[in-house]
C-alpha cells in the first residue's frame, strides 16, 4: 500500500488527503496551522486519526517535521501549501534528498510551473486550468 | 559588471550603493511597494518594483545579461529559487544567496546554490575566532576548489618553534600563507 505524504492541508490538500485515505492508502499530512487538522476532520464520521490518517503540526521546510511526518518512508510526496516558493523548494528536496519516488508539486504561477516541469518536476498549475476553463466558456459566447 | 539584486532591505540597498560607487551597473528588485518607493528616491532607475521569483520580473530586470545575481530577500525559499532560476534558466555565471535561517543552509547546498551566506554562521565564526575552542580557527571555505583556510597558533614549546618553514612537515596538499 503506497504511503502518501501531503504537505499543506488547505482546500486542495485536505480533499486529496481524505480521498486517498478512503481509497485505502496510508496518508500523512503536514501543516503548520492547527485549523487544517479540523478541516481534515470535517465531513468525516470519525476523526482523521480514527480513520487511519496521520497529522503532524509543522512547517514543510523543517527537517524534523518532515521526518516526523514520514518523508523517509514516503512513496508519494505532494507539495500543496499556499506558497509556490515553499512548494517548489520542498518538492525538490523530497525528490533529490529523500529520493521519494513520486513527487507532485502545486505551482500557481504558470510560467514557473512550465519551466520546472521541463526540468523533470511533476507540477500541477491550477491557474492554467482556470485560464483554460475561462477560454472554453468564452468560446460559447 | 552587471549585477541583479533581489531584495532592497538593508543588505540589498547597501550592496547596490557599494557596487554602483565602484561603477558597476546594478538593478535591484523589491516586492514591497512602500519599501520600493523609499529606496527609489535614492537609487532611481536602478530599482524595479516586482516579485523576483517571477520569470517576467527577472527578465524585465535584464537577468539574461547579468554577470552576477544576488538574492538577499528575507525569505530563504525566495532566495533559493531566484538563484536557481538565475543559474539554471538564465545561465548567470555567478550567484550569491543569503541564508536567513542557518538551518536552511543544507537545502541551498543540496540544490547546488553556492555560495550561500548566513549572517548567523559568519558571527559564529567570529565568536570562534575570538574564543577558539580547538586551536584551529576556520577562516574561509572555498567549496568549489575544496580548500579551507584555517588559522593555527603555534604555542611556545611546539616542536616547530624556531624552525624554518621548509623544514616543517605538513600533510600533502597543505600550504602556509
Image (spheres, helix red, strand yellow):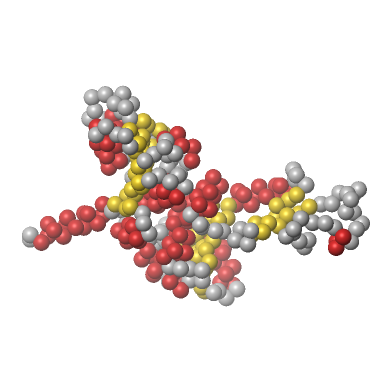
Res B167 quadrant in image: bottom right
Position of residue A56 measured from the top left corner of the image (x, y, whole percent): 40, 33
Work out whether residue B165 or residue B137 is closer to the camera in this orientation and state it: B165
Residue at 68% of width from left, 56% of height from top? B148
Residue at 70% of width from left, 47% of height from top? B127
A50 with respect to B157 (left or right): left
Work out whether residue A52 or residue B38 is closer to the camera in this orientation and state it: A52
Position of residue A77 measured from the top left corner of the image (x, y, whole percent): 36, 43
On screen, B58 above or below A96?
below
Residue at 53% of width from left, 66% of height from top? B94
Work out whether residue B149 or residue B26 is closer to the camera in this orientation and state it: B149
Q: Residue furthest left?
A: A141
- Quadrant, the C terminus of chain A: bottom left
Position of residue A111 measured from the top left corner of the image (x, y, whole percent): 32, 61
- Quadrant, the N terminus of chain A: top left
A32 with respect to B118 (left or right): left
Position of residue A84 measured from the top left corner of the image (x, y, whole percent): 36, 51
Amino acid at each position: 500500500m503506497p504511503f502518501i505524504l501531503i504537505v499543506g492541508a488547505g482546500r486542495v490538500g485536505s480533499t486529496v488527503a481524505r480521498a486517498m485515505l478512503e481509497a485505502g492508502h496510508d496518508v500523512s499530512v503536514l501543516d503548520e496551522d492547527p485549523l487544517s487538522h479540523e478541516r481534515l476532520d470535517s465531513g468525516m464520521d470519525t476523526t482523521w486519526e480514527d480513520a487511519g490518517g496521520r497529522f503532524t503540526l509543522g512547517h514543510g521546510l523543517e527537517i524534523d517535521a518532515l521526518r516526523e511526518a514520514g518523508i523517509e518512508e514516503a512513496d508519494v510526496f505532494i507539495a500543496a501549501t499556499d506558497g509556490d516558493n515553499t512548494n517548489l523548494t520542498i518538492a525538490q528536496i523530497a525528490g533529490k534528498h529523500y529520493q521519494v519516488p513520486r513527487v507532485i508539486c502545486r505551482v500557481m504561477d504558470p510560467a514557473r510551473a512550465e519551466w520546472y516541469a521541463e526540468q523533470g518536476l511533476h507540477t500541477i498549475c491550477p491557474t492554467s486550468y482556470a485560464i483554460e476553463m475561462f477560454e472554453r466558456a468564452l468560446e460559447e459566447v | 559588471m552587471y549585477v541583479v539584486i533581489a531584495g532592497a532591505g538593508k543588505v540589498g540597498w547597501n550592496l547596490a550603493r557599494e557596487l554602483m560607487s565602484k561603477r558597476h551597473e546594478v538593478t535591484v528588485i523589491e516586492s514591497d511597494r512602500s519599501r520600493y518607493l523609499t529606496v527609489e528616491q535614492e537609487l532611481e532607475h536602478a530599482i524595479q518594483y516586482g516579485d523576483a521569483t517571477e520569470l517576467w520580473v527577472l527578465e524585465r530586470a535584464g537577468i539574461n545579461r547579468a554577470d552576477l545575481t544576488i538574492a538577499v530577500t528575507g525569505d530563504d525559499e525566495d532566495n533559493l529559487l531566484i538563484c536557481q532560476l538565475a543559474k539554471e534558466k538564465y545561465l548567470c555565471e555567478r550567484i550569491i544567496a543569503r541564508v536567513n535561517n542557518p538551518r536552511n543552509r543544507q537545502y541551498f547546498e543540496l540544490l547546488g546554490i553556492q555560495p550561500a551566506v548566513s549572517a548567523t554562521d559568519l558571527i559564529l565564526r567570529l565568536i570562534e575566532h575570538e574564543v577558539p575552542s580547538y586551536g584551529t580557527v576556520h577562516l574561509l571555505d572555498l567549496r568549489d576548489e575544496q580548500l579551507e583556510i584555517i588559522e593555527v597558533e603555534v604555542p611556545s614549546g611546539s616542536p616547530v618553534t624556531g624552525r624554518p618553514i621548509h623544514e616543517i612537515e605538513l600533510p600533502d596538499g597543505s600550504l602556509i600563507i
